[in-house]
Amino acid sequence: MWGESKPMLKSRGGGGGAVGDEESDFFPPTPRKDWSAGLLKLVTATVIFMGGVVLGLSVSGSVARYYYNSHAELFFPSATYGAGDCGGPRQAFKAFVHPPHLAHSMSDEELFWRASLVPRADEFPFQRVPKVAFLFMTRGPLPFAPLWDKFFRGHQGLYSVYVHTLPDYKLNVSKSSAFYGRQIPSEEVSWGSITLVDAEKRLLANALLDFSNERFILLSESCIPVFNFPTVYEYLINSAHSFVESYNIDTPQCAGRYNRRMAPHILPDQWRKGSEWFELNRELAVQVVADNKYYSIFRKHCRPSCYPDEHYIPTYLHLFHGSLNANRTITWVDWSRGGPHPARYGASSITPEFIQAIRNNGTQCTYNSKPTSVCYLFARKFAPSALGPLMNLTSTVLDF
């Protein structure tokens, strides 16, 4: 680009003037001054040219590094995959399929895109033991963490824990706890708003980064297990269906929340409601995380007093994946007292008979298309005061 402005050296000879031809021949023109000026221009041009080349290469390298680093951070976030760890390519692959850390700098859009990538190969290139991912959504402390730690004890490698809290909240648990270091990058959540769905999808997406997670159960800080871990694990891993409550009844709290602006994508007879506390297999978890079309409809039209966390996943699964859903929840809750919130149980309510009543409350359901009386694996809502009595039952009725 610089070659179009080459310096031209001009001769001073034969130009007439006061000196005659002989004198000109006797005193031949000296190009010393002009050659010096030309040489200076040539050197200057060369320096500028080389400077441009160096600058261009530097900028190009910076752009390439930015492009590579930004995309590498999307696929292999350094905080998540431990870029600074030693171990070589084999260790890097292990960190890719089982991220050792939960911290990352991905936005929700990047995270959901990354989590929805699905391998096309039929078999995994590693020994895959399916795990159950326990997704806890809480604003602050987990009062039943000691109970859950006892529930998880002795079953490492069969479960994963993920916790969504307020953005700046730090869980106060010991290093031996199953909850230690398991907080995901979180955002503010408001009850009854689309931000609850955002948090659910955030938990699912972070859990999907671990390729061994096969089942995904959403829980709150007031939830407890009512069976031991082996029972829960076998029940979920061997199920042919996911567990999402989904129904439509003609009441203000259900059909009355439908917004006609959702048509034609969602029609009144396709509208569904159900418990927020879902359980999904990996296939459906990917579908929910990847969906943006119907999520955007709910973000725009499911407000106010619509409670999208009670409608989005039940409606979406009904539209496209109804045959994969058992159409029931596996988390027991007591709505018999009425009102916007379920009953809350404290220390005085915790007895062996109460736990047995939750397990066998007369409800009949189907498991893998066959009748069963084991319909609930978890229960809510429990006050922190219930921890002590529940811990006393772990070696007897709870059996862990």
Image (cartoon, rainbow, N blue to C red):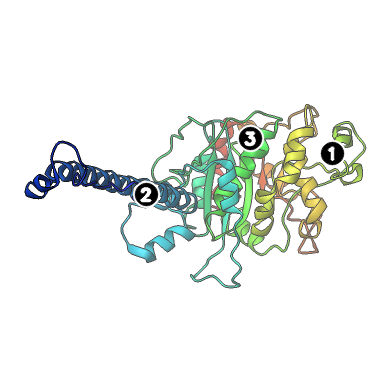
- Helix, strand or loop at mark 1: helix
* Amino acid on which disc 2 is placed: Glu
Q: Nearer the viewer, mark 1 or mark 2?
A: 2
Camera-nearest residue between 227 and 155: 155
Residue corresponding to mark 1: 262
Q: Residues within 10 Å of mark 1 (few under 14, many from 20)?
A: some
**Which mark, residue 382?**
3
Question: From mark 3 to mark 2, how far is it between C-alphas?
Answer: 82 Å
Whether residues under marks 3 and 2 lie with C-beta atoms below 8 angstroms apart, the answer is no
Image point 73% across, 60% down: which residue? 241
Residue 275 marker: none
Residue 170 visible to an observer of this rendering: yes
Q: Nearer the viewer, residue 226 or 304?
A: 304
Element class at badge 2: helix
- Distance (Cα) linking label 3 and label 1: 36 Å
Describe residue 253's horizontal placement relative to residue 399 as left or right.
right
Labels 1 & 2 near each other (Cβ < 8 A): no
Count numbered badges in the picture.
3
Residue 219 at x, y = what percent?
62, 43
Name the amino acid type tagged 3. Phe
Q: Earlier in the sequence, mark 3 or mark 2?
A: 2
Q: Quick one: label 3, few (<14), some, or many (20+) residues within 10 Å? A: many
Q: Nearer the viewer, mark 3 or mark 1?
A: 1
Residue 301, compared with residue 288, is above or below; it is: above
Q: Which residue is mark 2?
A: 4
Compare marks 1 and 2 and give the one earlier in the sequence: 2
Q: Residues within 10 Å of mark 2 (few under 14, many from 20)?
A: few
* Numbered disc 3: secondary structure: loop
